[in-house]
C-alpha cells in the first residue's frame, strides 16, 4: 500500500464510515497557488462558497489567502444570510433571486450594513428587486457563451439573455430609470473555458476540439467583455465589480484589463473533473477532498464491495460524473454497476489486499456537492484528524 493510503487510513482509524475528509495541508497549498496566480496581475479573488459549503473551511481559505480575497460569491440569498450571521461580509449573489422571501433577506442584509450585490438579467428582475428590496446594488449577469451563425451555434451554458454590447447597454439604461436599484457591475462567467476540460480520458477524440474551443473562446470573451465594460463606462456607469473566471479559466481571465476580480472555489478541493485539463495552473493543484467507504464484502477473489458511494455529480450525464476510486491505487469501478446508493463493487488489482473493514478513498467529480451528503467533515493534517467541522447540511442549512 502507498504511504498516502496508510497516512489517511491511520487518520481515520476508529472513525465512522462513510466519512468525508479534507486534507487541510493540501487545501492550504491549493489556496496558495490560487493566490500566486492572481498576484501576477494584481487581481483579488472572490471565494465561491458553493464549492466549499463548510464554514470552517471557508474561513480557513480566506485566512490563508488573506489580502488576496475580496468577499464571497453565494448561490442563495439564505446562504448569504447564514454566512452573514457567521461573521462574513461582501457578498455577490450570483444567481438572480425572485421569491419575496429571498428579496426580503437581501433587503435585511443591506439594512444591517452588509455589502451585498445581486445578479440580475431581466427588466422584470430589476423591477422586482427595486420594489421589494429598495436600495439594492445590482450587477448584470452576462452570457459569455460562444455563438456563431447568428446564434444558431451555441457553445457554453444557457443562462442569461444578455450576450452582446447592445443587450447589456439596453438593460443598463433601463436599470438607471428604476427606483430602488443601482447598477454597480457585471458578472461575466465564461463556462466554456472554466468548465471545459480538454484532456479527458472518457472521450479523448473530442479533446482537440475542446482545446480549440477554450482557445477561441478565451480570445473572444476577452474582446467582448472589454467592449461591454467600455460601453457602460461611456454611458456614465461606475463599475466597482467586473467579475469573471473560475478555477478552470483563472490563467486567462485574470490577465484581462477590464476584470476587477476573479472567482474560484472548486480548485481548493480539486475534484477529479479538474484532472482532465491541460492548463498548467489547474494541473498544479492537488486533490484535497475525499470520501471514505468501508469494505464490507468480497464477492470474488479480485473484487470487494464497499458500503455506500452513490454520490454522482450534477450536470451532463457521463462516466466523468461518477466518483473516482483513489486509494489504494489501481481499484476500478465495474462498468455495469458503477457507484451504488448503498453498495459499490470494485475490482482489485494484483498486489492489493484489503481486509473487511478497510477504508477505500474516493474523489468526487465536483467540489461542494459532496458536502450535501454529510453532516460533518473530518479535517486531516498528516495522519491525524485535527478538527470535525459541520457542513452546511450539518448546520441545518439546505438551499436547493
Image: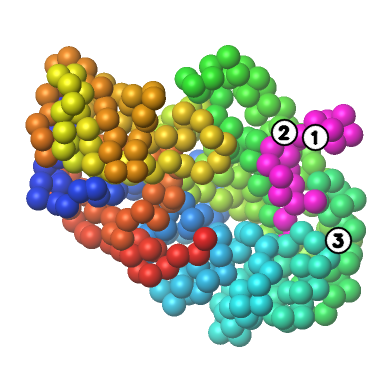
Taking depth in this image into account, of 184 and 13 the one nearest to the observer is: 13
Q: Mark 3 falls on what kind of element?
A: helix
Report whether 347 appears left or right of 12.
Answer: right
Residue 382 seen: yes
Answer with mark 2 or mark 3, whichever residue precedes in sequence.
2
Above or below for 158 versus 139: above
Q: Quadrant of residue 169?
A: bottom right
**Which residue is painted at 51% across and 74% down in the image?**
81
Q: Which residue is mark 1?
A: 147
Foreground: 88 or 298?
Answer: 298
Q: Position of residue 262 (x, y in %)?
A: 59, 50
Of residues 90 and 44, which is closer to you in this image?
Answer: 90
Magenta part of the chain: 139-161
Residue 340 included in the magenta stretch of the image: no
**Secondary structure of the residue carrying numbered label 2:** strand
Which is nearer the N-term, disc 3 or disc 1?
A: 1
Pinpoint residue 274: horizontal percent, then vertical percent.
46, 34
Residue 17 percent coordinates (x, y): 20, 48
What is the chief secondary structure element of the magenta stretch? Answer: loop
Q: Earlier in the sequence, mark 2 or mark 1?
A: 1
Q: Is residue 33 visible?
A: no
Which label sits on residue 171?
A: 3
Q: Which residue is mark 2?
A: 155
Which of the 4 image quarters holds residue 156?
top right
Does residue 147 show up magenta in the picture? yes
Locate residue 121, reporting x and y percent.
77, 59
Residue occupying the point 10% across, 46% down: 13
Farthest residue, direction bottom: 111
Q: Residues within 10 Å of mark 1 (few under 14, many from 20)?
A: some
Amino acid at each position: 500500500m502507498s504511504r498516502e493510503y496508510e497516512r489517511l487510513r491511520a487518520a481515520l482509524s476508529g472513525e465512522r464510515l462513510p466519512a468525508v475528509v479534507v486534507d487541510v495541508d493540501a487545501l492550504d497549498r491549493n489556496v496558495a497557488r490560487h493566490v500566486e496566480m492572481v498576484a501576477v496581475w494584481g487581481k483579488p479573488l472572490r471565494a465561491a462558497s458553493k464549492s466549499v459549503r463548510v464554514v470552517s473551511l471557508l474561513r480557513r481559505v480566506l485566512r490563508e489567502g488573506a489580502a488576496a480575497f475580496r468577499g464571497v460569491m453565494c448561490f442563495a440569498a439564505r446562504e448569504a444570510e447564514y454566512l452573514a450571521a457567521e461573521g462574513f461580509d461582501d457578498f455577490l449573489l450570483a444567481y438572480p433571486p425572485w421569491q419575496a422571501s429571498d428579496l426580503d433577506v437581501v433587503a435585511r442584509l443591506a439594512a444591517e450594513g452588509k455589502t451585498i450585490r445581486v445578479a440580475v438579467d431581466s427588466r422584470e428582475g430589476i423591477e422586482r428587486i427595486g420594489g421589494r428590496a429598495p436600495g439594492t446594488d445590482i450587477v448584470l449577469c452576462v452570457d459569455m457563451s460562444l455563438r456563431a451563425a447568428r446564434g444558431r451555434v451555441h457553445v457554453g451554458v444557457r443562462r442569461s439573455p444578455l450576450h452582446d454590447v447592445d443587450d447589456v447597454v439596453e438593460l443598463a439604461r433601463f436599470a438607471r430609470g428604476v427606483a430602488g436599484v443601482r447598477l454597480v457591475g457585471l458578472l461575466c462567467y465564461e463556462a466554456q473555458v472554466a468548465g471545459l476540460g480538454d484532456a479527458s480520458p472518457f472521450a479523448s477524440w473530442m479533446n482537440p476540439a475542446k482545446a480549440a474551443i477554450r482557445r477561441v473562446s478565451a480570445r473572444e470573451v476577452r474582446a467582448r467583455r472589454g467592449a461591454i465594460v467600455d460601453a457602460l463606462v461611456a454611458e456614465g456607469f461606475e463599475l466597482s465589480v467586473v467579475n469573471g473566471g473560475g478555477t478552470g479559466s483563472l490563467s486567462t481571465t485574470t490577465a484581462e484589463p477590464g476584470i476587477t476580480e476573479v472567482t474560484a472555489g472548486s480548485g481548493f478541493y480539486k475534484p477529479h473533473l479538474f484532472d482532465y485539463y491541460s492548463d498548467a495552473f489547474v494541473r498544479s493543484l492537488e486533490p484535497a477532498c475525499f470520501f471514505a467507504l468501508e469494505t464490507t464484502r468480497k464477492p470474488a477473489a479480485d473484487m470487494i464491495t464497499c458500503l455506500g458511494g452513490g454520490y454522482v455529480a450534477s450536470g451532463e450525464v457521463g462516466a466523468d460524473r461518477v466518483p473516482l476510486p483513489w486509494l489504494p491505487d489501481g481499484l476500478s469501478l465495474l462498468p455495469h454497476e458503477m457507484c451504488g446508493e448503498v453498495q459499490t463493487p470494485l475490482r482489485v488489482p494484483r498486489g492489493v489486499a484489503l481486509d473487511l473493514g478497510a477504508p477505500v478513498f474516493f474523489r468526487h467529480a465536483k467540489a461542494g456537492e459532496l458536502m450535501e451528503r454529510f453532516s460533518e467533515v473530518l479535517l486531516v493534517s498528516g495522519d491525524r484528524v485535527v478538527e470535525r467541522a459541520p457542513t452546511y447540511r450539518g448546520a441545518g442549512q439546505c438551499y436547493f
